Each structure stands twice: as C-alpha cells, then as structure tokens.
Amino acid sequence: MSVRVRSSPSDVLLSVVLVGCQVLSIPLAMLRRALLWRRQPLLVWLSARPGGVGPSLRRIAFAQLARFVFKICLLTGMEGVVLRRVRCYGTDGLPSGGCVLALDHSPWGRVLARWAAAEQFALVFAHRRWARWAGPAHLAAAPSGIRRTTAELVRGRRVAVIIDDFVARGGCEVDFLDHRTRVAMRATWLAAQARVPVVPVTICYRSGVICVHFRPALSPGQTRGARAQTTRELIDALAGRIERRPAEWQDLFAFFDASVPRTTSVRRYADLGAP
C-alpha cells in the first residue's frame, strides 16, 4: 500500500525520525533476541511467524520506537503532524446509527484516541487514564461511564471499545495464540444493551501511515451465548492478524510472559493503566 504524506517541514522531520527508528530497531531486535531465552514460549511462537524471529523482533522494536516518537509529538505541539498520518478505509460501510467499534490494544492507540476526539469521529470507552489522550471524547470504564456509553450509542454515536481484555473470571473462554484463556465480553455486552451492531476494526502501520480498516458490522447477539460467539469471532480474527503481524499487538510480550498465568488478566502488566 502506497500512501502519500504531506511534505511540510514538520512532516519531513517526522519522516526522517521514523527512518531513524527503522535503523535503530535492528540492534534493539538483536538485543531482545539475546534476552528471549527467558521467554521460551514466545521464542517458539515467533519462530513460526512469517520470516521467523529476527524480522518479527525488528518490526516489534520499530513499533515501540515509533509509538514513543508519536507520544512525544502529541505532547509537544506536533499533534497535527501525527494525526495527518491516520487513514480510514471502509467508512462508507459503517452503520448509519450508533455502533461499537471493536478494537485491540494497538501500538497506535494514543494517536487514534486523539484523532477520534479531534475529528469527532467516535467516543472512547476506556480506563480513566486514557482521558489524557481522548479528551472530551473519553467515557470512563466505570458504572457511570457504562450508563453514559449506552445512552450515547442509543443516540447514534460511535463508541470505541477494547476487545482484548483478558480476565481471570467472567467473560467467555477462548483459544488465543495457542493458549486457552478468558476474555471480557464488554464490547458485545454494550452493543447488546443499546441494540446496536459491533464493527470490527483492523489497525496497521504501513509506510509511515496508520491505516484503520472498518470491517462489516456484526450482530452482538441478545443472549449470553450469542454474545460469547460474537466475541470469539472477534478474538479469532485478532489472533489471525497477530499471527501474520505480531508487531501490531501492543500486549504480545505481556501475554506470553511465563510468569503471567493464562487465566490472569494481562492488563496489570501492559498498557491499559499507562497509555
């Protein structure tokens, strides 16, 4: 995919910095590979990915570096330079009324939360610390926030909700990246409460651009069993994307960390609490 990015001095500077991130990702990947003996399950899993361990670790290192660069830009008055790199595909197929946008923990979440607020594209249902990035578009993941979220969906608003929140209890059981675990059904539950569809969202980074693809809407289901089935479909699709491009999932290392039981929420170790 070839996408042109504007060529203002700030855009050019950011492009140069991102090229530097590509270069720096090589020695960082080598260092990380040397330390992977502590994470044998992850090493084995990465060895089966396209290109093997080395290319996967380079892409992961680049995503982490670029994520940090984008954060600095958002905090230092260069927000516009970053937000111009967001491209959306499939918006013509979005429901005309309210819907839940089902996302995963992408490395580009900060940028997309700020973009959603700036473009008034969607509200963001998330932990209170995400208010820093979503601003007025933030809906707190608390009882009061749940009530407001349902009301906004009924009014016809779009609300972004994370689907890959793994939990110790509740939710539904899923097979994910060769592990049996449990995942919260928050996205499908909210959609069912408001009687609106769920729209799977795929996020990826291509040639300096954050690409957001909106997939055909799904019915959340009105029974618990139906919501669990829709949740599994979303999680199965996410697993397939991660297997093809591991760098696009922010929680990869936390999920595979040998010290974290598969039935324990990885949110304590990952980025939900510190976006």
Image (tube, rainbow, N blue to C red):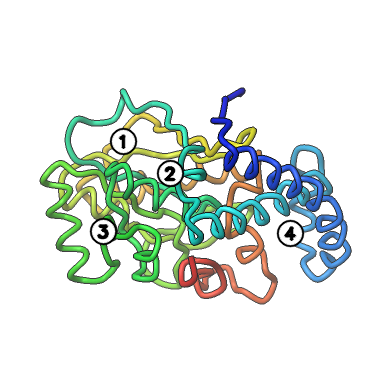
The answer to which of 135 and 143 lies nearer the viewer is 135
Q: Which residue is mark 3?
A: 136
Cα–Cα span, label 4 and label 2:
22 Å
Cα–Cα span, label 4 and label 1:
32 Å
Which label is found at residue 42? 4
Q: Which residue is mark 1?
A: 218
Instruction: Label 3: state its secondary structure.
Output: helix
Dot 1, how many residues are within 10 Å of its Cα: few (below 14), some (14-19), or many (20+)? some
First-in-chain label (3 vs 2): 3
Cα–Cα span, label 4 and label 3:
38 Å
Cα–Cα span, label 1 and label 2:
9 Å
Quarter of the image with the N terminus in it: top right
Query: Amino acid type of disc 1?
Result: Leu
Of marks 3 and 2, the one in the foreground:
3
Of marks 4 and 3, the one in the foreground:
3
The answer to which of 91 and 14 lies nearer the viewer is 14
Cα–Cα span, label 3 and label 2:
28 Å
Count of numbered marks: 4
Query: Amino acid type of disc 3?
Result: Pro
Dot 4, how many residues are within 10 Å of its Cα: few (below 14), some (14-19), or many (20+)? some
Which residue is at 46% across, 43% downward? 83
* Residue 86 picture location, percent across and down: 47, 38
Tell whether label 2 touches label 1 (CB within 8 Å): yes
Which residue is at 43% across, 44% downward? 234
* Residue 264 picture location, percent across and down: 52, 73
Query: Amino acid type of disc 4?
Result: Leu
Instruction: Label 4: state its secondary structure.
Output: helix
Q: Which residue is mark 2?
A: 234
Q: Would residue 62 be found to the left or right of residue 112 on screen?
A: right
First-in-chain label (4 vs 3): 4
* Residue 129 picture location, percent across and down: 39, 70
